[in-house]
Amino acid sequence: MSKKIVGRVDIVDFPKLGLFDIDIKMDTGAYTSTIHCSKIIERDNALLCIFNSDVHKNFGKTEIIFDTFWRTDVKSSNGYKENRYKVKSEVIFFGKTYKINLTLSTRDAMKFPVLIGRQFLRQKFMVDVDLEHVSYNTNYKQQHEYSNTI
């Protein structure tokens, strides 16, 4: 299986989270992927997550309940360990749906609401830091060509 080339940033969809056209950054220094989550409430063996942001575009007030979740330690770039919730979801690259594990973190102070880490990238993608929006541009062109043929 050959790996697809992705750029350092892109725009993708997280359909199960109701999040579309989301800005992401590839982070080969991070093992896990993380997504902005403005509020997390653990109740009755379920996790209520509110994906909302006044800073990040296309983050409306989406509420998702996860029945399956766990906690994991994540070491930040400054060396601090943080215990975060982790959930399973799906992400779309190049029009194809992939399973992805996401840690939840408040990222309003960050430029990108989502970081894609090595755990997801490995065996599927190679990152070319000179490129941007490869998946988004490929997907847009395919959709546009399809709509012109109908």
Image (cartoon, helix red, strand yellow):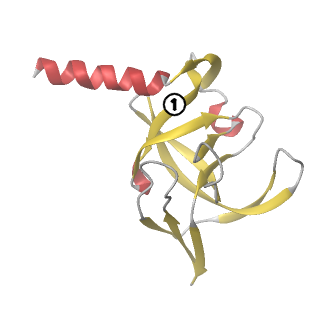
- Closer to the camera in the image, 47 or 131: 131
Left or right, residue 119 beside residue 63: right
Q: Quadrant of the C terminus?
A: top left
Snapshot quadrant of residue 94: top left
Q: Which residue appears farthest toward the left when viewing the image? A: 150
How far from the left and from the top, in percent, is residue 81? 86, 57
Amino acid on which disc 1 is placed? Asp
The residue at 48%/21% (across/down) is 134
Q: Is residue 21 above or below residue 106?
A: above
Left or right, residue 143 beside residue 28: left
Q: Is residue 39 above or below residue 106?
A: below
User: Disc 1 marks which residue?
Assistant: 10
Asked if one can make out residue 89 in the rendered structure from this viewpoint, the answer is yes
- Closer to the camera in the image, 70 or 60: 60
How far from the left and from the top, in percent, is residue 25? 61, 35
How far from the left and from the top, in percent, is residue 33? 65, 45
The residue at 46%/66% (across/down) is 64
Asked if one can make out residue 45 in the rendered structure from this viewpoint, the answer is no
Q: Is residue 144 above or below residue 66?
A: above
- Closer to the camera in the image, 51 or 101: 51
Left or right, residue 141 beside residue 112: left
Label 1 secondary element = strand
The residue at 50%/58% (across/down) is 53
How far from the left and from the top, in percent, is residue 61? 42, 64
Q: Quadrant of the N terminus?
A: top right
The residue at 31%/19% (across/down) is 141
